[in-house]
Image (cartoon, rainbow, N blue to C red):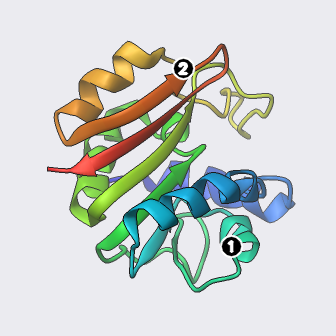
Amino acid sequence: MTISEQYRQLNKHLHELGSYGRKGDKWAARVRELIGEYQPTTILDYGCGQGALGRALGIPIREYDPAIAGKDQPPEKADLVVCTDVLEHVEPAHLDAVLDDLKRVTGRCLFAVISTRPAKKTLADGRNAHLIVEEWTFWEERLSRRFRIEAHSANHKEVEVVLLAL
């Protein structure tokens, strides 16, 4: 299981408020570079939120978000998977299941951006919206079990990583 029903409902509520899951477009330029490099025939935005990345790219992409009706069905494999501002929101008890699911759906390349600091938003139950706040070494250990790390960069607020399917 990649998400509990209780947590799915909390995230659904945040999405319905309209200010959650709206910034995927900020990675459109980097995703275009990866499209040029890896020439994918299929692209999946895993944790797509409101679909800002797809709109910014202006090309058909698949979208998956377990907290949004119509985008909540388990996704199929895609050549390029984009997972930005998602993994820090995963329930710690379900992190391995989500990473295994990302491995399952990644045909060639996974591009992930992971925040390494607390969120400005709070869940309705009082918890910080970033349930996992960890540095690169935490993520490197878990990702390298499932992918080949092609490139990564980190700063004081996030890690950007390009991963290749094994």
Residue, x 49% and y 58% (percent of image)?
34
Instruction: Check disc 1: other Cα within 10 Å, few if <14, some if 14-19, many if 20+.
Output: some
Which amino acid type corresponds to the residue marked 1 in the rendered image? Leu
Q: Can the viewer see residue 3 in this picture?
A: no
Judging depth in this view, the residue of 70 and 51 nearest the camera is 51
For mark 1, what is the residue?
A: 57
Tell which of 93 and 161 is nearer to you.
161
Amino acid identity at mark 2:
Val
The CA span between labels 1 and 2 is 29 Å
Quarter of the image containing the N terminus?
bottom left
| Residue extending farthest right | 18
**Which of pointers 1 and 2 lies earlier in the amino acid sequence?**
1
Q: Indicate the secondary structure of the residue bearing disc 2.
A: loop
Q: Position of residue 145 (x, y in %)?
A: 16, 34
Q: x, y (%) of residue 125? A: 68, 35
In the image, is 128 to the left or to the right of 90? right
In this rendering, the answer to whether 87 lies above or below 45 is above
Toward which corner of the image does residue 17 lie, by quadrant? bottom right
Res 75 visible: yes
What residue is rendered at 57% in x and 48% in y?
84
Q: Is residue 84 left or right of residue 76?
A: right
Identify the image quadrant of residue 24: bottom right
The answer to whether residue 66 is left or right of residue 102 is right
Residue 44 percent across, percent down from the top left = 46, 70
Q: Residue furthest front?
A: 37
Q: Residue 133 has which mark?
A: 2
SS class, disc 1:
helix
**Image coords of residue 142 (percent x, y):** 26, 29
Circle 2: is it few (<14), some (14-19), or many (20+) Cα within 10 Å?
some
Name the residue at 44% across, 30% down.
152
